[in-house]
Image: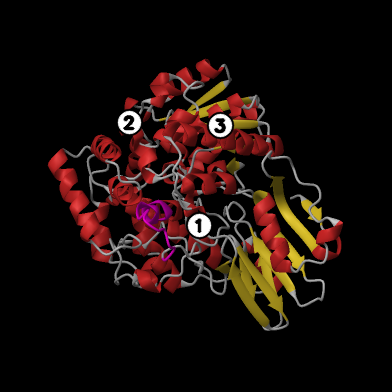
Amino acid sequence: MPVIDMGSRGIVIGTLFSRPDGAACRSIVSDREVDEDAQSMARRLLDRCWGAYIAVLTDPDERGTSVLVDPSGLLPVYSVTTENHVVISSNVRVLERCTHVHLRVDWKDVHAFLCRPELRSRATCLKGVREVPPGSLTTIFGRSISEKLLWRPDAFMPVAPHPSFGDAANQLRETAIAVIGAWERSLGPVTVAASGGVDSSFICGALHCGGAAFSCVTAATADPSGDERPAVRRLAEHLDVPLAEGIYDPALFDPLESASGALPRPSRKSFLNGVDRLFAKAADDLGAVTIMDGNGGDNLFCYLHSAAPIDDRLRAEFTLSGWASTFLDSCRVTGCDVPEMATAIWRRMTRPAGFPPWPADERLLSRPAPDFESAEPVAPWTRVPVGPHGGKHDHLALIMRCQNHLHGLISPMSRFSPLMSQPLMELCLAIPTWLWCEGGLNRSVARRAFADALPPSILTRTAKAGPDSYIRAIFDRNRQAVRHSLMDGLLARQGLLDLPAVEQALGIDAYTGDSIIYRLLDLAEAEHWARAWQD
């Protein structure tokens, strides 16, 4: 991993780019800035640079050591506090080696994670291991530890006068070309995991318009229900880039293998092991070393399915024609008719303002979920002031929900999710919610950004197929292994599972049953992850 030496002021570990051009940073501190304290240096980094990094900073008067974690979350950082040391690393196994302590599973936190698997908390599922919040500055002085959040999303809320739809799309285009291009130059050669949808195609558009050489890879189910190869072929042909294709093979799925590996939470879906291997082989065939994906695109590009954009426009920029236009756009995006949407607006406007509820998933668990209020999200955004743009609470919740599904800089499977890079996140937060549904299409600003570069058939798609039939096939083939893992495993011994409910769910028809199949596979993933750490 790259290291930038800051002399007596510290080091930056990871990848760092300058604003606005995305050039790789080689030097950070000028002579006149060398006497700044650590907090001033950290703010300068946040303002001038972006990337995936951790900065270790010292004060000129040696008042301790400070650690800045970049806001994107693309280089997660974890800490363990011992009697004599605070150990910080992006690799949990390094924490284990440095502390000479065998890390153990924290079953209370496993239960909390299973209740809200999309909520990334400061607590991991390993005892004593906590995640350092992105955008925070942690200062260690002797036995004293203090923490200050320097990057806050409320600094990037929409402000009047609001941009036009076209201006917002142009800003997004320029920023994406700079950001995705910078990552390609740093991590390339690159292939894009293309699904035929908006988000991965957005990455392709940015690479193409930036003049980068890249390729695409896609995977399909053996049956037509999850086969997006025709759409991806059109994309690859339109952009004139190489394409590798693969078929998901349920026979290659290992029901006892954890996809979460050495991660501190069982946060990856079990079926992803097969996807990783398929993509890795394709990338090797294409001569690529990094596989970019569009993970987090729905979230970053404000894919709301509610009346929030209408409410926001009414409160922040009321014009009758604009409000009526957003009303109709939201009806098209959600599929609601006019009376249904009017009712939704009334409910939204009369409910208490604030962060949206985060319901727990207690299915197949033996005990109730902890209150959401007791959670400690690694992104502490639940009380961020958003002014008249109440829909930005929903936008922030969307971004928080994808944090467990991003592939960061040290992803062992060479996957990387560039869309949550700091400049893109800041810009997308600043774009009002109503622009994202302009014209009755979800993520419409992202669609417009590369409208001149992508096939029209991609730009107008609002839904695409997924690997559902593959996932159901691996469940069907491995039902007995899943049963044994759950009924006789560590989760059961810890009393976390409602075993009669699990037994009943295991009898479901694999191909016509509901989403409980996904829940069973997620519980099995947690079981095998826990076994890996307990061994």
Secondary element type, mark 2: helix
Membership of 386 in magenta stretch = yes
Q: 504 above or below 313? A: below
Task: Kindly indicate whether the residue at mark 3 contacts the one at mark 1 (C-beta within 8 angstroms).
Answer: no
6 left or right, relative to 334? right
Looking at the image, which residue is at 65% across and 55% down?
A: 46
- Categorize mark 1 by other alpha carbons within 10 Å: few (<14), some (14-19), many (20+): many
Residue pointed to by mark 1:
153
The amino acid type found where label 3 is placed reads Val
Q: Quadrant of residue 40?
A: bottom right
183 left or right, relative to 293? right
> Which is closer to the viewer, label 2 or label 3?
2
Residue pointed to by mark 3:
192
529 left or right, relative to 212? left
Which region is colored magenta?
383-396
| Sooner in the amino-acid sequence: mark 2 or mark 3 | 3
- Categorize mark 3 by other alpha carbons within 10 Å: few (<14), some (14-19), many (20+): many
Looking at the image, which residue is at 82% across and 67% down?
A: 35
Residue 271 x %, y %: 44, 44
> Which is closer to the viewer, label 1 or label 3?
1
The amino acid type found where label 1 is placed reads Pro
Secondary element type, mark 1: helix
Image quadrant containing the C terminus: bottom right
Q: 244 above or below 67? A: above
Residue 366 x %, y %: 29, 70
Residue pointed to by mark 2:
439
